[in-house]
Image (cartoon, coloured by chain):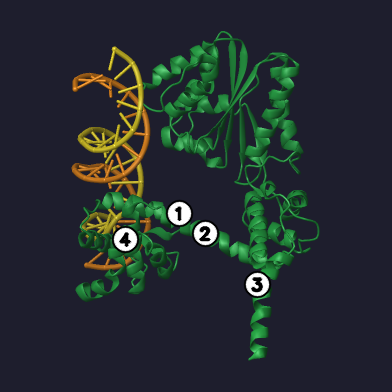
Chain colours: A green, B yellow, C orange
Amino acid sequence: MEKRRENEQTYLDSIFEKYLNAKKIFKNKEVLRHSYTPKELPHRREQIEALAHILVPVLRGETPSNVFVYGKTGTGKTVTVKFVTEELKRISRKYNVPVDVIYLNCEIVDTQYRVLANIVNHFKHESGFEVPLVGWPTDEVYAKLKQIIDAKERFVIIVLDEIDKLIKKSGDDVLYSLTRINSELKNAKVSIVGISNDLKFKDYLDPRVLSSLSEEEVVFPPYDANQLRDILMQRAQEAFYPDVLDEAVVPLCAALAAREHGDARRALDLLRVSGEIAEREGASKVTEKHVWKAQEKIEQDTMEEVIKTLPLHSKILLYAIVLLDENGELPANTGDVYAVYKELCDYMDIEPLTQRRVSDLINELDMLGIINAKVVSKGRYGRTKEIRLNVTPYKVKNIYRFDYSLQPLLTVSIARQRRLF
DNA sequence: TGTCCACTGGAAGGGAGGGCTT
DNA sequence: AAGCCCTCCCTTCCAGTGGACA
């Protein structure tokens, strides 16, 4: 009796002491976030100098060439461009040259109208004028844009990040007008910095736009494991307290991220999440074990988030595929999946979409990596998609469990077996 | 060799939903 | 309120297609 109480007491003490005595892990976690711009960018000197060389005419009052910046995700394109343009802005003040840098992420600003409107609105403090986010005819926004930019002598550098998204969605009209705008301006000079991680997208461009835009090109090669290690080391020094990182941690994060096409973003995430996991466990050191856990967690989390935010019909469609999987009927083709999807809609009293639309939704699920959809020809038996599931049915159901509107679906598996088979 | 399946994926267009100006 | 305009999501229509089969 006495002994047991003693044990319990030690246990209770240890709950708190575990955390109390745990060494703090993070000194400054912010350093590991994507948005953080470090003072130095390791292994990007070449690209920084190339960009600086291209933009330097500004300081002499000449229009710089337009630039295309290429490189896969997490190769430091955005951060480098931001770094160089910030420096340019800083130094241009010394030379008394007015420079405006407008940074637009085309994943969000993805139409001609929105690009133009955003540029106009960048000057709202100066012009006291703001274009609504929808509503105006596009050519009027363009006219306003010219008028506002041209109000005084200056250089305007427009950075279009993820420019491929813009082109794919709304064509190259915007680029066409923006690349020719200089001939219609009297005072101001505009140049464009396009950032893309897709090399193929040049094929979509009108040759005139292409030649004007890629007057200069800067390529960002992927980081290799050693370079990633340097980057992580640099950040780790600021982010973590001394000696909390096991020696193997940074090299492992670097190696794992290098395997995924040298993505520095991924490497930083890994390092941050490893630290968080260690902290939660009350460990005094971050070890390899934490990195492996982090790797798994990141994969799980992104997939879960993607499924959670799917629109209703995509969720029903995914559930149709889950049911087929549970019945051992995968790979299935579009027709089969559509039939089950339609039944599910009936069951939920929802108007089903057409097969044409569902075919697009299948492609979307494929792009998101939730399913695998390969176009195959079965000869005499037609051409269709072969559809497979990339996540476990259990996982999907678990996510749906917390979505009230999807509750009816979860009971269907049994009903379906009774009704259809 | 041609046929024909079960679709694919492009094109056009409608209409709801957002927001503007007048 | 009426009249525009833009975007998103969707439908309708349809030409096109890889390859098994006769």
Q: Which amino acid lies under the numbered mark 3 shown in the image of this protein?
A: Ile
Picture residue at 61% right of the left edge, 62% below the top: A295
Task: Give the percent coordinates (x, y) of residue A232.
Answer: 73, 52
Q: Which amino acid lies under the numbered mark 4 shown in the image of this protein?
A: Leu
Identify the residue position indicated by label 2 in the image.
A301
Task: Give the percent coordinates (x, y) of residue A148.
Answer: 51, 14
Identify the residue position indicated by label 1 in the image.
A368
Give the Cα separation between the discs numbered 1 and 3: 41 Å
Q: Are marks 1 and 4 on the same chain?
A: yes
Can I make out residue A383 in this image? no
Which quadrant of the figure contains the N terminus of chain A? bottom right
Q: Chain of mark 1?
A: A
Identify the residue position indicated by label 3 in the image.
A15
Picture residue at 62% right of the left edge, 26% below the top: A215
Can I make out residue A288 in this image? yes
Secondary structure at numbered mark 4: helix
Which residue, as the protein is rendered here, is positioned at the far top?
Answer: A186
Comes first in the chain, label 1 or label 4: 1
Q: Chain of mark 4?
A: A
Identify the residue position indicated by label 4 in the image.
A406
Give the Cα separation between the discs numbered 2 and 4: 20 Å
Give the Cα separation between the discs numbered 2 and 1: 14 Å
Picture residue at 63% right of the left edge, 46% below the top: A74
Q: Which amino acid lies under the numbered mark 1 shown in the image of this protein?
A: Leu
Front residue of A375/A280: it is A280
Query: Is A4 left or right of A40, judged from the image as shown?
Result: left
Q: Which amino acid lies under the numbered mark 2 shown in the image of this protein?
A: Asp
Quadrant assignment, res A389: bottom left
- Nearest to viewer (mark 3 / mark 4): 3
Please tell me whether residue C15 is drawn above or below residue A17 in the rendered image: above
- Nearest to viewer (mark 2 / mark 3): 3
